[in-house]
Amino acid sequence: SERMRHDHQLNTIATSSSFHIPELAIGHLLHHLTDQVEYHTLQVLLYKFKSIFDHNTFTVATTQMSHVIETHPHTPPVSKYYPGNRTSNSEMYLIITKLLHSELIRESQSSYAAPALLIKIKDNTW
């Protein structure tokens, strides 16, 4: 359904939806309200915290905990290379660039690796 499609898009990294603009996301949340006073009251409150509805930026909780996995003296297992097509490789590059830029991930200095595969979903997004 149309509603499920929009809800799903809000939880993806990149969407073709316009709900990444906080004002549009808030408008979508309030569209069912018929009482203008209630609509305006909630709109003012939600606009006050509109950064929460900004799906253009990523947010992550931070912690002071340090975590290390000791792997020595063992050598890393051999990881199979998974070739992709030009489109999926391009999409993977864009996703990784966004995640690096938003500091959700960082470049690894580890010799260990794991494959990352993209699966195209029904709405033609990755």
Image (cartoon, rainbow, N blue to C red):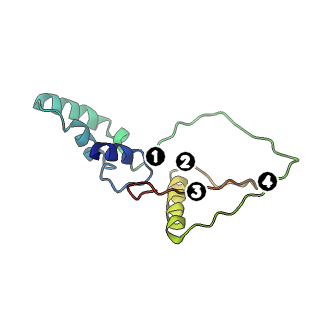
Residue 116 x/y as whole percent: 60, 55
From the viewer's perspective, tell me whether residue 88 is left or right of residue 18.
right
Mark 1 crowd level (few <14, some 14–19, many ≥20, 10 Å Cα)? few
The reply to whether callout 1 and callout 4 are in contact (CB within 8 Å) is no
Residue type of the residue flagged with mark 3? Leu
Q: CA distance from mark 1 to mark 3?
A: 21 Å
Query: What residue is drawn where x is 68% and y is 63%?
Result: 81
Q: For mark 4, what is the residue? A: 77
Q: Amino acid at mark 2?
A: Leu
* Contact flag, marks 1 and 2 (Cβ < 8 Å): yes
Residue 104's tag is: 2
Determine whether, in the image, residue 37 is placed left or right of residue 57: left
The foreground one among 30 and 22 is 30
Instruction: Tell me the number on the disc at residue 58.
Output: 1
Q: Residues within 10 Å of mark 3 (few under 14, many from 20)?
A: few
Label 2: element kind: loop
